Amino acid sequence: MGDAVSREQAAREIAELRQVIAEHEYRYYVLDDPVISDAEFDKLFRRLQQLEAQYPELITPDSPTQRVGGQVSSAFRAVPHTRAVLSLGNAFSESELRAFDRRAKELSRARELDYVVEPKIDGLSVILRYDNGRFTLALTRGDGLSGEDVTANVRTIGSVPLALRPVPQGVPEYLEVRGEVFLPKEDFRKLNEEREQQGLAVFANSRNAAAGSLRQLDPKVTASRPLRALFYELRELRGNVPMPGTETGCLELLKALGFPVPVYYYCESIGEVIDIISEWQEKRHTLPYDIDGMVVKVQDLALAQSLGATGHSPRSQIAFKFPAEQVETKINDIIVQVGRTGVLTPIAILQPVTVSGSVVSRASLHNEDLIREKDIRIGDTVILQKAGDIIPEVVAVVKDKRTGEEVEFSMPEACPSCGSPVVRPAGEVAHRCINISCPAQLKESLIHFCSRDAMDIRGLGPAIIESLLQAGLINDAGDLYNLTQEDIAKLPGMGQKSVSNLVRSIEASKSRPLHKLIYAFGIRHVGARTAAVLSRHFSSLDEIMDATEERLMQVEDVGPETAKAVVMFFRQDSVRKLIDKLRSAGVEAAIGRQANTEQTGPLSGKTLVLTGTLSSMTRHEAQEHIERLGGKVSSSVSRNTFALVVGSSPGSKLDRARALGVRVMTEQEFLDLIHGRSSVDGN
Ligand code: IVH
């Protein structure tokens, strides 16, 4: 699979790969029934990237590799909608639903009306256009008459089809569809957690997070947020594919064309609608994304059309809004936690209370500004709800219940863990402890290092880390690998079995892949996803450590702030020491030279060195070609160098290569190699 191929072969393979990839995306996002693993999918994707890199002229905008276009815009241009984008009227009770049904029956003179019920996804509305089956434009709702062009950002969303799947009549000449872009609950939680650690303002709910992510000027940022989309309204259809006569018909057609659609229920009467809604009110928390109600739609589209609209909402549809589950409780105290990046987070200690299905006894108050804004004091009675159904949030203070005994809170001037000064950097909402060796930061960063998405050291949780620190057995993550059975056995509550289990899991973690290690370092702005992208682009930790900001920014998803954070991180002495410790302890697979075994290609595992000036490309382009073929570029010639590529006016590297008997390649030979006209062994 890694062999260089001719243009003709490449064109054929590219077409095939695109189809296979689109099929797997469809199974994953639309049918929710993937048949291959993520790793297998990545492999197909990388092969396509590799072929397209060899023959860039074969790239088309609907290739799955083109989701991140990379262009940064300065504003979103306004584009008029083809017709008004309406919103929905609301119902808050059963009787309001019945009134809606009665009115629709009166106006249509129907005895009984049938409906479709769908969850009301709490995201933001987008309108997508497809010309001859190709995705061409995405707009926000805007004021309903014109919206903002968010095409580049919507393109990055994996569940948005770039090309429609043909139905028996072919693909529509023109199609316009409306749907909802949202951030799944779990991703929302992670995003906020990361932002809190970075001293950035948190999003109040998943809808704001989705909106903030979609309205990014740099599509790379949008691509780094795992947005999803579901489509529920077929607004326009022209060409050979006929417009269905019913709501369910539209949803089925959308699905067949490749759009993920929400679950929906066909109901023969308003009574059935009400039953479905009350069922869902109970189980709404079980969905992986937030819903704030259910939408009820008249099934027959001609009838719906005849009902018309009032103001901005159609008379044939209504949104039933779920009441937000809110409870009252008391704030017994506000404590301050120090995170692994030194951010101080105020936490409300609550009188334990059950809300949306679980007992809550703590709620993050995020930062001092938010506490001031809501005027939250220790001793206050407050209203609590779960934002995004999972994160407990203090909504407001019940001021009527104040006794006068309540105490105002202010951030401490000294770190509660180490006593060092606390500062609030300009432009941040967070307060930070300035001591980089603050024990609380160390503890939190160790907890992160051992966590599941990082080095996954089972059994090494917060309590044991705390004991190890207190016993003076560890000072950084590198020390974990020097712990002996005897050291661990000294800790309180450790039996023989737990000691050997722990030793075994520490040992097992030595062979975690590179991306887990990078994530485990807890570098600012480098979440699990960015870590994976970095490890895919560089073949070893050494290369990442040596990369410049410019080089890092060429990696998809990596913006200037992240690039800077990575460079600054590896510049620290303490980090270099930590890496030395990890290396000598044998955290091999991750750090060693063959780290990225996933890289495949004709130059896989081979190191090339460049010298002199190439006439047909810049040094950087040459490097990219080599990396795409699975190889890497080093700055000096050694016995392990596979070949030295020589341009005009070569330097002393050429002498060294000759002395060591390393293969010397002319520019022409190199071009033949990267364009597949010769193979690695020179034939
Ligand atoms: S139908 C004419 N169906 O809710 C309006 N809307 O409050 C057609 N929404 O702006 C909208 N899930 O952004 C419809 N299954 C669903 C929905 C849904 C979420 C949003 C949509 C709309 C808002 C109305």
Image (spheres, rainbow, N blue to C red):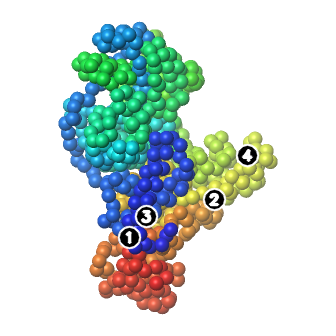
Residue 606 in the figure: left or right of residue 8: right
Confirm or deny contact between disc 1 and disc 4 (CB under 8 A): no
Where is residue 132? Give x, y as percent: 29, 47
Give how far apart the Cα atoms at labels 2 and 4 are.
23 Å
The x and y percentages for residue 368 are: 40, 31
- Please report the residue visible at 41 percent of the width from the left and 56 percent of the height from the top: 18
The tag earlier along the polypeptide, 1 or 2, is 1
Residue 13's disc is 3
Q: Secondary structure at mark 3?
A: helix
Judge from the rendering whether residue 113 lies leftward or rightward of residue 75; answer left or right.
right
The three-letter amino acid code for the residue at tag 2 is Lys
Q: Name the residue tied to disc 2.
A: 510
Q: Which residue is pictured at 46% across the width and 79% down the height?
A: 679
Q: Which residue is mark 1?
A: 8
- Which of the two discs, 3 and 1, labels the residue nearer the N terminus? 1
Residue that label 4 marks: 491
Q: Secondary structure at mark 1?
A: helix
Q: Position of residue 136 (x, y in %)?
A: 28, 47
